[in-house]
Image (spheres, rainbow, N blue to C red):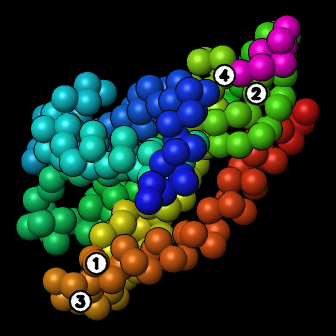
């Protein structure tokens, strides 16, 4: 028996959004990792220099499964209207151990890159509404605005809506302080050197990353909705 959510994703009106979702997700993942690589290079670690780029090619070469296959599969498995994926940027663990604060800033750079994209998307939304081209129409992650003349979405309104939504959620998810998420590496910004060593000692077990992902997924499943609603209300605070 075919999963009903897959059948939902096969509807023509849903399938039309697949390329838009894919491009927005690919851009979001690429910038996230490019920011890690850039701040790492600024801090003295050139390990990921190849990935200091918005060209997704080197990121795809490193994580083809998370950058290509998972986003498309997740779109169908979740019935459209959502897409997940991942990428990664390598770093020198010896450099990170020697420079814990620089390493923490490198970890923070990825989520900040996502919030930067969300901010740019918000600016475009406000500009288009102020210019009379778009109107506010919050219906879903992919529908925050509509064309003023028709009251319907088009590829551009969908793309900008997805950019805003995905990057708010991706940035927030990665800030959860559990391995292997970025938030785990950000915590040392607020710790002493001794406390930082203890913090990382807590998660040296090889299974920590797997357990961390499970914990993060459960937690974020409960807070993703409120996080997105808060972001949308903030977006339209003055409208």
- Going from N to C along the chain, the mark reached first, 4 or 3, is 4
Residue on which the image places disc 1: 210
Pointer 4 with pointer 3, Cβ within 8 A: no
Q: Is mark 1 on a helix, strand or loop?
A: helix
Residue on which the image places disc 2: 145
Q: Is residue 185 left or right of residue 228?
A: left
Whole-percent x and y of residue 191? Answer: 41, 80
Can residue 139 be seen in this snapshot? yes
Local crowd size for mark 3, using a 10 Å CA cut-off: few (<14), some (14–19), many (≥20): few
Can residue 187 be seen in this snapshot? no
Looking at the figure, which quarter contains the C terminus? top right
Q: With respect to residue 215, does 81 lie above or below?
A: above
Residue at 49% in and 61% down: 173
Residue at 32% in and 49% down: 70
- Going from N to C along the chain, the mark reached first, 2 or 4, is 2
Local crowd size for mark 1, using a 10 Å CA cut-off: few (<14), some (14–19), many (≥20): few
Pointer 2 with pointer 1, Cβ within 8 A: no
- Going from N to C along the chain, the mark reached first, 4 or 1, is 4
Whole-percent x and y of residue 2? Answer: 45, 55
Q: Is residue 109 left or right of residue 133?
A: left
As drawn, the label of residue 237 is none
Pointer 2 with pointer 4, Cβ within 8 A: yes
- Going from N to C along the chain, the mark reached first, 1 or 3, is 3
Measure the C-alpha gap from mark 4 to mark 1: 37 Å
Residue on which the image places disc 4: 157
Q: What element carries label 4?
A: helix
Q: With respect to residue 107, does 41 lie above or below?
A: above
Q: What element carries label 3?
A: helix
Q: What element carries label 2?
A: strand
Residue on which the image places disc 3: 201
């Amino acid at each position: 028996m075919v999963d009903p959510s897959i059948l939902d994703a096969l509807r023509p009106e849903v399938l039309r959004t697949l390329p838009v979702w894919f491009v927005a997700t690919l851009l979001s993942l690429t910038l996230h990792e490019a920011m890690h690589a850039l701040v790492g290079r600024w801090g003295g670690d050139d390990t990921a220099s190849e990935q200091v780029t918005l060209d997704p090619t080197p990121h795809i070469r490193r994580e083809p499964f998370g950058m290509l296959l998972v986003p498309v599969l997740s779109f169908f498995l979740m019935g459209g209207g959502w897409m997940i994926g991942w990428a990664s940027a390598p770093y020198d663990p010896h450099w990170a151990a020697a420079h814990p604060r620089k390493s923490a800033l490198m970890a923070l750079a990825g989520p900040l890159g996502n919030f930067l994209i969300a901010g740019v998307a918000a600016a475009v939304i406000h500009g288009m509404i102020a210019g009379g081209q778009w109107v506010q129409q919050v219906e879903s992650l992919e529908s925050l605005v509509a064309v003023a003349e028709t009251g319907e979405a088009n590829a551009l309104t969908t793309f900008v809506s997805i950019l805003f939504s995905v990057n708010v959620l991706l940035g927030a998810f990665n800030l959860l302080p559990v391995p292997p998420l970025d938030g785990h590496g950000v915590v040392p910004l607020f710790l002493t050197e001794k406390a930082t060593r203890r913090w990382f000692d807590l998660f040296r077990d090889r299974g920590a990353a797997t357990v961390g992902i499970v914990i993060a997924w459960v937690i974020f499943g409960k807070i993703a909705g409120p996080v997105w609603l808060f972001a949308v209300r903030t977006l339209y605070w003055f409208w």
